[in-house]
Image: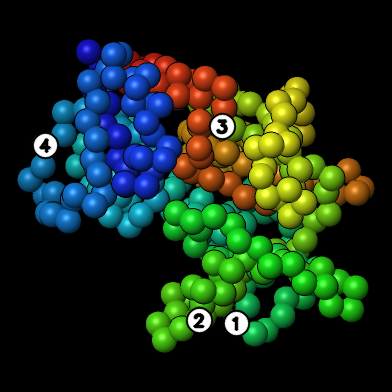
Amino acid sequence: MIKIGLLTDSYHLEKKSIQFLKYIKPLADISVYLEEDYLINFSNYFFEEDIFFVKAKGDLVLNLVKLIEKETSIPVINSSRGISLAFNRFLNSVALRKAGIQVPNFSLNPVGQPPPFNEYIIKNIMDQKNYAFNPQVQKKEGYLSVIDVRAINESSGNYPKYTHLYYQEFIKSKWEYKVYLVGENLLYFKQLPVLINPDKMKSRTKIEKIPELTEMAYTATETIGLKISSMDFLKSKDGNYFLTDINASPNFNYIKNGPKIIGDYLIKQAKL
């Protein structure tokens, strides 16, 4: 029987992985490596898995992934490089733009220094925590600004996580487009932007393939180094698509038969 290792944390295990585990357990021998349980030295650990699947993005999980990559030839989905790049908004914006992907204008500014564009979203630099986007919308002199409370919280207080903020130029779009990638398979959805309807799933509908998004999705995930991903796109009034976010740990429960799609893909990759 195929042996799969799930590298995760308590949040992702309880909130996002239960259906996956129910599907995969009859088909594979699965071991769960929980971040909160592994504050130990892994130098003498022996891994017997055929493949690892990462469903978290904390530092301990990343270090365990790096150890597995260094000490074994067992494939890990996704890689430590891909996960690290995906949650660092500034670095992935630089890498994606260099690869020819159209991303919104962005800047990394000291706290209190405005960006070089009039309408913007302030986001946390490291999208690594397990808490949701919390926007505060403001209008000044007719221009819109959106502030993610997470970013402010992480850059303030006695021990700020960082002293800069990531600014992304605001793209007005009727719809937000969501593309999931599992291996070579792409699934397309659209929904009302979260600023219009915070309950994004209520308005989400599956849509047909959009060629522009297909090309961008494949290039983006190859650039960052992801085999499983979700990506957010906005479409400007002049018809151009912009990649606004790329995620290395998507919630595949939002996809019809998502746990099966992921499980079947991992089993197939383990047999290669």
**N-terminal label among 2 and 3:** 2
Say which label, 1 or 4, has the lower sequence index: 4
Question: Where does residue 153 sit, x and y in percent of width and height?
Answer: 51, 74
Image point 44% across, 48% down: which residue?
Answer: 83
Q: Secondary structure at mark 4?
A: loop
Between 112 and 131, the residue placed more toward the observer is 131
Tell me the residue at 30%/34% (across/down).
Answer: 6
Name which of mark 1 and mark 2 comes first in the sequence: 1
Residue denoted by label 1: 111
Identify the residue shown where x is 22% and y is 20%: 29
Name the residue type under label 2: Ser
Q: Is residue 145 visible?
A: yes
Q: Earlier in the sequence, mark 4 or mark 2?
A: 4
Which residue position is annotated with label 2?
156
- Give the CA separation, mark 4 to mark 2: 42 Å
Q: Earlier in the sequence, mark 4 or mark 3?
A: 4
Amino acid tagged 3: Tyr
Per the rendering, the mark at residue 46 is 4
| Residue highlighted by disc 3 | 254
On the image, the x and y values in percent for residue 252 come to: 51, 32
What amino acid does circle 1 point to?
Answer: Val
Residue type pointed to by label 4: Phe
Image quarter hosting the N terminus: top left
